[in-house]
Amino acid sequence: MHLDIDNLNSRETPFYYYDLDFLETTLSDLSIASMRPNFNVHYAVKANANRPILELIANHGFGADCVSGNEIKIALESGFANESIVFAGVGKTDDEITYALNQEILCFNCESIQEIEIINELAYNLNKTARIAIRINPNINAETHEKITTGLIENKFGISMNRLGEVLEIIKNSPNIELSGVHFHIGSQITKMYVFRELCARINGINRWFNELGIQLEHINVGGGLGIDYDAPRINPVPNFQSYFALFDKFLQLFPGQQVYFELGRSVVGQSGMLVTKVLYVKEGETQNFLVCDAGMTELLRPALYQAKHHIENISSIFSKVENYTVVGPICETSDCFGKNIALPLTRRGDLLIMYSAGAYGEVMSSNYNLRNKVDALYRSTRWKEMANEYNRVEAEAS
């Protein structure tokens, strides 16, 4: 990813920095790797709902995986086709369901029996038929952080396989529901490919079970979860999409005509964004030195929430000497810490730090905690220069 150092130095910090050229490269790799007649990629909008990013993704013809009514709305405004939008989420409100029905979206991923009943009722009121997929918990350990593991048997997400018979009976008696497929999502930031192979094996059994009941599922939604390299983003900037899709192509056993849906988010946008922050103070502690930055957990929540690690660089230092620092933010929380014992060149007040891999779950999770202002974004693009310049101008005027 390219760093325009002069442009970074001229901006008020903190801010998010997006390289749209790099995102374009990632999207091209994703398009090529997923180029199979029955594979369909839906971008998980929750990873980053930044408008120019959404527009680039929509321009490549991908669909959208949304988890709120507002995500559906911005997806439509950004150019995603109605019939390419999937609506997931464990707590859809009546208003959101009604909005999605009126927009004629592709499918609802349903996570409970009562949700199916409510969707049927609302669809009846509108004289519409809702296409749904049953989200099933396959009870697979994604071997990722416990707070982003979602496919175990006891979870707020999805429906246990033990209740599928009951679910099918409900659907049978719901005239405004059309069962289109099944949905799985076992977690996020998955880096061990054998986990996806295990998922394929579990899906194959479930798919056969439906077929034996005489139910031909139109699609299998395998979710997302493909991880990125947070430790070495410069060395491994683009995930191995080829291996990921080849695994499903090899091990997922489909019946004729079945489509496969993928819901990738982090792997699409994660490495295209960074958080740029300035060192306010260098504080000498008893056993460690602190770099107090003007960005905090209000701009990048993942380290505080998941104990996540982001690669950090000092792009201002002129020194060759290296020291270890604890990098923290200004928020009145001890958890407002980006990392401990981070090796950086000798750092002074005013130096700029770059926190890599902030394109996913960075800006979209930001907050006004401590009554802090939401920060701006800077866009770099050569191919999309006009668009980038316009968004930079709008952001500058807003600030």
Image (cartoon, rainbow, N blue to C red):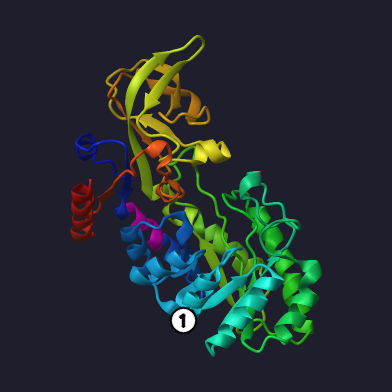
Where, quadrant-wise, is the N terminus in this rendering? top left
> Where does residue 191 sit, x and y in percent of width and height?
59, 48
Q: Quadrant of residue 314?
A: top left
Name the amino acid type tagged 1.
Asn
Q: Residue at x 52, y 87 (%)?
A: 126
**Mark 1 sits on what residue?**
102
Q: Considering only vertical position in the picture, is 232 above or below 168?
A: above
> Where does residue 320 sit, x and y in percent of width and height?
33, 17
Question: Is 62 in front, or is 200?
Answer: 62
Mark 1 Cα shell of 10 Å, populated few (<14), some (14-19), many (≥20): few
Where, quadrant-wise, is the C terminus in this rendering? top left
Q: Residue at x 31, y 59 (%)?
A: 52
Q: Residue at x 65, y 65 (%)?
A: 184
- Magenta stretch: includes residue 355: no
Can residue 258 be spotted in the picture? no
> Where does residue 182 sit, x and y in percent of width and height?
65, 73
Can residue 197 be spotted in the picture? yes
Q: Considering only vertical position in the picture, is 39 above or below 343?
A: below
Which residues fall within the magenta stretch? 22-28
Question: Is 37 in front, or is 261?
Answer: 261
Q: Considering only vertical position in the picture, is 313 above or below 241?
A: above
Q: Residue at x 28, y 26 (%)?
A: 316
Q: Report helix, strand or loop for mark 1.
A: helix
Is 227 displayed left or right of 395 in the figure? Answer: right
Question: Is 166 in front, or is 380?
Answer: 166
> Where does residue 165 sit, x and y in percent of width and height?
80, 76
- Magenta stretch: includes residue 27: yes
Magenta stretch: dominant SS? helix
Is 236 displayed left or right of 109 in the figure? Answer: left
